[in-house]
Image (spheres, rainbow, N blue to C red):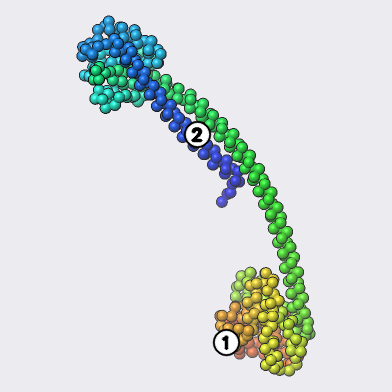
């Protein structure tokens, strides 16, 4: 999955947030301004009715047709108001929804909405603004203009006698609102851009600082890992030296640990063990007898049979080895294998007397490799066994001293093991 730098993600999310906020804010402001403008139209309609229409009409005019003189007088007086408030046309309707006067022949009864008229005439609402619509079948200069109708009741003695409908260009509302929204939107957007650039600058500097710190940490980590590797290598070399020193204490056992490790690896590969487990077993084979460095020479190299007390001392060498290797981190998983390589499959071994599959697999493997190499090597108390005799002895102890499954594997590769030196 492709990963983007933090600053790009921040930029994308910020721009999305700015645009979204700008749109929501602009719509809210536009609607607020439009509502204010419509509120002003209501006041305009009331002023027009009270100062022009009602001053020139009587209640009875809404039941009879208005005389031409009165109509002319109203139209004459209304022109100034219409110019002042951008009113396009005015039409008067009585209770029977009949047109009694219009200042413009293009503005006819057919352009009115009956539902809006009903709302006013029945006093359901005090004021109605229609949806915008386009003028059709009118003078060429007005064709296609977008207009709205403002419906305002005409009251005499508290009773609705008719409705004045003012036709107003829609742009008088929208242009005013759009202009203010544009100014506000530009101001807000400009402010957002400045804030965004400041935040990007801060974020960029912070990112650079973090990148530099991360590089320093990586360098420090590499130096620490190198130091730890050198330390482990040094400790490993020391342990190798100790292991070789153990083997060197008796010329007859020289190279024993290395051969045990090689035989163990041959058995492990037949079992298809992972590379990681192979490496663990290799170390365990090399260091399985490291604890013998703590066993006195007179016991370790004794020509005759060991006494019970001496055998008890010998049995301590696995735990002595664990104590020596316990501080080597990469050998942690090899320690249980080393500790239990003298356990017997039947449960008669040491140091814990565990049996069967309770014994770690690596320990069971080393037990066979250790025994084979010990039998095929000269010792102070006996001569070496032949390869065939050693193999026969291992077969004989299958299921008691050794894991019978591993003995079967051993038998498959015994000819290869014979050539290890």
Percent of width and height locating residue 332: 65, 72
Of the two numbered discs 1 and 2 on the same chain, state the one appearing first in sequence: 2
Q: Residue at x 29, y 26 (%)?
A: 125
Q: Label 1: how many residues lie within 10 Å, few (<14), some (14-19) or many (20+)?
A: some
Q: Residue at x 70, y 92 (%)?
A: 306
Residue position marked by numbered label 1 in the rendering: 346
The quarter of the image holding the C terminus is bottom right
Percent of width and height locating residue 391: 65, 87
Residue 363 found in image quarter: bottom right
Residue 291 found in image quarter: bottom right
Give the answer, above or below, for where 118 lies relative to 218.
above
Camera-side residue of 29 and 221: 29
Percent of width and height locating residue 7: 60, 43
Q: Which mark is residue 22?
A: 2
Q: CA distance from mark 1 to mark 2?
A: 82 Å
Q: Residue at x 61, y 46 (%)?
A: 5
Residue 138 visible in the snapshot: no
- Callout 2: SS: helix
Q: Is residue 303 left or right of residue 124?
A: right
Q: Label 2: how many residues lie within 10 Å, few (<14), some (14-19) or many (20+)?
A: some
Farthest residue to the front: give it. Answer: 157
Q: Which mark is residue 360?
A: none
Percent of width and height locating residue 186: 53, 29
Give the answer, above or below, for where 400 lies relative to 49.
below
């Amino acid at each position: 999955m492709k990963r983007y730098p933090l600053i790009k993600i921040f930029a994308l999310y910020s721009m999305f947030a700015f645009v979204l906020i700008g749109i929501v804010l602009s719509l809210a402001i536009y609607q607020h301004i439009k509502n204010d403008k419509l509120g002003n139209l209501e006041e305009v309609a009331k002023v027009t009715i009270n100062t022009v229409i009602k001053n020139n009409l009587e209640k009875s005019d809404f039941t009879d047709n208005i005389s031409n003189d009165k109509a002319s007088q109203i139209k004459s007086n209304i022109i100034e108001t219409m110019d002042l408030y951008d009113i396009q046309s005015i039409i008067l309707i009585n209770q029977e929804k009949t047109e009694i006067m219009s200042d413009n022949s293009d503005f006819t009864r057919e352009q009115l909405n009956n539902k809006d008229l009903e709302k006013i005439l029945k006093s359901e609402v005090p004021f109605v603004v229609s949806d915008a619509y386009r003028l059709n079948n009118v003078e060429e200069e007005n064709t296609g203009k977008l207009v709205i109708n403002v419906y305002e009741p005409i009251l005499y003695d508290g009773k609705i006698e008719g409705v004045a409908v003012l036709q107003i260009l829609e742009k008088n509302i929208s242009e005013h609102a759009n202009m203010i929204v544009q100014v506000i939107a530009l101001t807000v957007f400009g402010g957002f851009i400045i804030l965004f650039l400041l935040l990007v600058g801060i974020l960029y500097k912070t990112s650079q600082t973090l990148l530099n710190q991360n590089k320093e940490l990586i360098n420090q980590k590499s130096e620490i890992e190198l130091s730890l590797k050198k330390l482990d290598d040094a400790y490993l070399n020391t342990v190798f030296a100790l292991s070789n020193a153990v083997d060197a204490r008796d010329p007859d056992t020289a190279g024993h640990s290395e051969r045990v490790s090689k035989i163990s690896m041959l058995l492990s590969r037949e079992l298809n063990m992972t590379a990681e487990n192979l490496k663990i077993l290799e170390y365990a084979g090399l260091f399985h007898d490291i604890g013998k460095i703590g066993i006195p020479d007179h016991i370790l190299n004794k020509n005759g049979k060991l006494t019970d007390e001496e055998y008890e001392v010998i049995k301590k060498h696995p735990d002595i080895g664990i104590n020596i290797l316990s501080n080597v981190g990469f050998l942690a998983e090899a320690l249980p294998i080393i500790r239990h390589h003298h356990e017997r499959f039947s449960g008669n071994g040491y140091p814990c007397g565990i049996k069967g599959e309770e014994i770690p697999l690596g320990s069971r493997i080393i037990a066979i490799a250790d025994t084979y190499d010990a039998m095929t090597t000269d010792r102070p108390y006996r001569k070496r066994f032949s390869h065939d005799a050693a193999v026969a002895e291992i077969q004989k102890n299958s299921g008691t001293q050794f894991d019978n499954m591993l003995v079967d594997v051993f038998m498959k590769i015994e000819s290869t093991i014979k050539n290890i030196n």
